[in-house]
Image: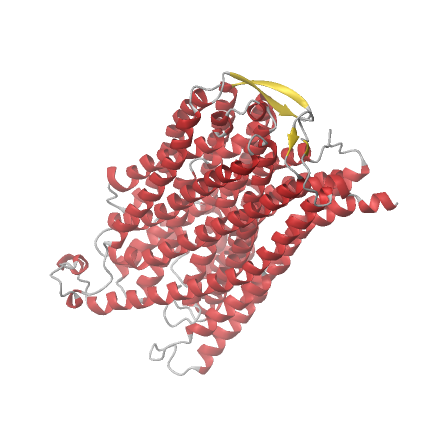
Amino acid sequence: MGLMSEALTQILIPLASLVGIGFALLQWFLVSKVRISSGSELEDGYNDMLIEEDVQEEGIDSDAAVAKCAEIQKAISEGATSFLFTEYKYLGIFMVVFGAIIFLFLGSVKKFSTESEPCTFNKENLCKPALANAIFTTIAFFLGALTSALSGFLGMKIATYANARTTLEARKSIGKAFITAFRSGAVMGFLLAADGLLVLYVSINLFKLYYGDDWEGLYESITGYGLGGSSMALFGRVGGGIYTKAADVGADLVGKVEHNIPEDDPRNPAVIADNVGDNVGDIAGMGSDLFGSYAESSCAALFVASISSFGSSHDYSAMSYPLIISSMGIIVCLITTLFATDMFEIKNVTEIEPSLKRQLVISTVLMTVGIAFVSFFTLPSEFTIFDFGMEKVVKNWHIFFCVSIGLWAGLVIGYTTEYYTSNAYSPVQDVADSCRTGAATNVIFGLALGYKSVIIPIFAIAASIYVSFSLAAMYGIAVAALGMLSTIATGLAIDAYGPISDNAGGIAEMAGMSHSIRERTDALDAAGNTTAAIGKGFAIGSAALVSLALFGAYVSRAGIKTVDVLTPKVFIGLIVGAMLPYWFSAMTMKSVGSAALKMVEEVRRQFNSIPGLMEGTAKPDYATCVKISTDASLREMIPPGALVMLTPLIAGTFFGVETLAGVLAGSLVSGVQVAISASNTGGAWDNAKKYIEAGATEHARALGPKGSDAHKAAVIGDTVGDPLKDTSGPSLNILIKLMAVESLVFAPFFATHGGLLFKLL
């Protein structure tokens, strides 16, 4: 037994969740103290801090600018909320249908019997009937889906709440604007980490009331939680990604390239849709995505542990090790956040990016100490882990190394991504330089950079897989994935900071604020672009480990002794699985293209048919553009979603468990490469464009200014990269995780009834 008692474990996990939620609400309160209204409206003696003398801008009516900010924020918030509600309405129908499929498939394994039966792994014990597994897995699926939807929605709400406040704070100083944007990101990070942990903890305890000593059945049914979280994330990511890029590409091509007007010019009809898109794609989508990874890695670790000595000896504290790691992560991230908001003040633009990167390092170092502490206190000094039918003896310090290597591999992936996507380093500067000879060379250089950026992350993932598997079999890989995600609250805060800053810049431009304010918001945004790429790197790296852990759990659950690549059944699965990421990317890219086409036509139509639009005397019709993006994304998210959800069901039912194992392995191996290269290529093109626009160095000024031939080439590269970095790349990591967790949930059905085609032949 470990040193920590069951009672203490039962107190610490919910306590950490509540601390996380409390901290998020405190940050929300601090952000809400920035008032969006002009001084004249405040009758209650409250001195409006925003209209201090030192922020009066030359020749700009401050009251009008503040009022305009509030108006724009309202439009963005309403657009984002209405999109999410429409999306969730469709997804509600999907959840009910898919919930019914889970119940029918799993219930039919033993013909809906209500008799207790021998356990799968400990044959001498009796376990609860298959019907109970079907019912509880379905309930867990709904809980995961609701938590995922809630995570995305809350993140989007705080982001739309904070964007105008960030703009207004930028009039005082860059430091104040940074703190507002970062605090808002932290609200999302902590709410998501704490909510996910709390719901999982409560579900396990409620399910335990029925399952009692049958821990194998209990944790098998909990895997539905990860499936629910990820299936919502898939549609949120794909739908949001198509929405944001259709608007972005449409706004850029007509506005910047054809009419030579700035990015967020209020004359551009697609500009509100573009800002709405940042929130529904990058915030709501990313939130659901990382929640899905977190839920799945927890479920994989819990399932593998339940069929090892923790489960058979009913050691609750050791069993809850994955949840205690996440609890420790919340506390570590809370301390880390204070470094950014309270301990160091940002005085100038150059300090933004180092401050964000420092967050990653501080959280990783503190978390390593936390992991050592947790591993020593909760795990017995020696125990056995289930290893494909064998028992493997493991010591508690082995598990410490597994979690730590996952955590540090995450940092390596984060820093590599940053090197390849930040315009402070040579790779992106080379891409910017290639714009001198036009768009074609820019595209060639960008693609080469993306492919090259895969090398170090893959070695980092490979090293963590080798070490963790050698030390603790599949359990080691599951906890390594958890290690990478243990600092999720900080990772998400850094990630959500990007779109909030991007929106703040857009609002400053549309509200007609002075050039100096716009420069500050641009600097916040450029740093945000890099950190968003780091967030995507983390998401993809953790997805690789999570899906491998789920793959191991699936192989154990389906009763496969070895997966032999040389058998034709497995090899055909392997080659088809490797093709799936390409098919999926083709679907999502084409969806963005066709939605952008409609958007470009609408924006052109408005420029040509509304008199006085270019002169700024008439208002564009923003609502039509928002509608085009909404309709396109809801329609286009269905085929890629169906591809991912149906593949495991078809492969498992018709071709059997071995072929499905091949499909999972193939999609994992090719999906990770495609996802990393797509995300980094897009990020590099975006920052190459920003590098030319900012003109901060002699080299950048030689390529600029805005509107020069090199800048136009950079805009085209950025437009090509948009669907890569914000739609296809980030959605691919959900593809590989979701297929694995779905296979695990349906494994009992496939093992009993699967392989229909091979039975007929």
- Display coloring: secondary structure
Choose top left, top right, bottom left or bottom right for residue 561.
top right
Q: Report x, y in % for residue 582.
A: 65, 50
Residue 498 in the figure: left or right of residue 39: right
Residue 556 in view: yes
Choose top left, top right, bottom left or bottom right for residue 270.
bottom left
Residue 677 in view: no
The structure residue drawn at horizontal position 35% and vertical position 45%, both measured from the top left corner, is 186
Q: Report x, y in % for residue 357.
A: 37, 38
As drawn, 305 above or below 757: above
Q: Which residue, as the protein is rendered here, is positioned at the far right?
A: 761
Residue closer to the observer: 585 or 11: 11
Residue 92 in the figure: left or right of residue 368: right
Q: Report x, y in % for residue 329.
A: 40, 34
Image quarter in which the C terminus is found: top right
Residue closer to the observer: 745 or 462: 745
The structure residue drawn at horizontal position 40% and vertical position 23%, both measured from the top left corner, is 373
As drawn, 119 above or below 34: above
Residue closer to the observer: 210 or 388: 210
Q: Which residue, as the protein is rendered here, is positioned at the far left?
A: 45
Residue 759 in the figure: left or right of residue 646: right
Q: Which residue, as the protein is rendered here, is positioned at the far front?
A: 115
As drawn, 35 above or below 14: below
